[in-house]
Amino acid sequence: MEGSLWDVTPGPLAENVLGHVELATGNLDAARDRFVKAVAGFRALGSPWGTGHATSALAWVALSTGDAALSERLLDEATAALGEAGPWFLMLTLYVRAILAVRRGSLDEALGFVRESLTRVRDLHDKFAFVYALVPLAAVAGLKGDDAWAARILGARDVVAERTGAAVVDKSVHDLTEQAGREVRARLGTARWAQAYAVGRMSSIDALLKDVDRALGQTPENALE
């Protein structure tokens, strides 16, 4: 299409992609610089989705450096920019918000963000976002003491990752993923872990959502749409 965004934004788009590459490899300062340039470029072009997506990525960097307050502020800015950009672009903001909620011990709040994310994943068939959404979900299950649930979540995550190649490259949540796996496995024991994990590998998004609603004390009639 003549004059489309794809014709005029190679700079900001490239900076945004390169920022994610730097973030994935743990180069947080370089990632921040890339995303700052991307935000500036998208703003200059009047691109709400580009501005919002790059700002979400900056919030992810702030999360990775432990600056929760800055991350929250950037997420608010990103959400405002993405208000009319479509549901797909909110996936990253929901993931970062869920991790922040887990970090401050607001487990039900984290479940709410995961629930919204999984609902969007189901509608959009976004396997990449699915694998990420299960990181805070498994962490919440473990922190709530529901080890069998955590094992099922990890089974669901792993089978999708194996089938699609989607993988979590967020080094800032390494402690959460390790805790959810190692500690839950130790508490369950080999046999119970294997059984719950196997069940999880056969579960659906709808089954995961039902478990979230159960944890939130919701019934099918009063669960969020």
Image (cartoon, rainbow, N blue to C red):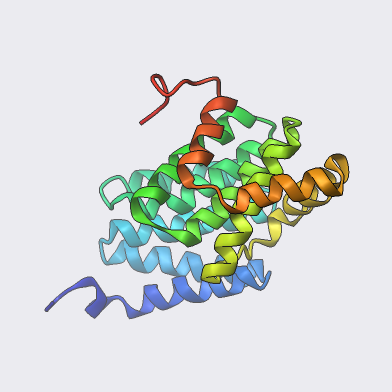
Quadrant in which the C terminus appears: top left
Name the side, left or right, on which 101 lies relative to 84.
right
Residue located at (28% from left, 51% from top): 86
Foreground pick, 5 / 209: 209
> Taking 110 as reference, is 223 above or below it?
above
Residue 169 appearing in the image? yes
Q: Quadrant of residue 50?
A: bottom left
Q: Is residue 193 left or right of residue 104?
A: right
Give me the residue at 56% from left, 26% from top: 214
For image coordinates 78% across by 47% down, the residue present is: 193
Q: Residue at x 57, y 41 (%)?
A: 98
Residue 174 x/y as whole percent: 74, 57
Does residue 201 appear left or right of residue 129 in this picture? right
Report whether residue 135 is seen.
no
Residue 82: x %, y % from top left: 33, 49
- 211, above or below 138, in the image: above
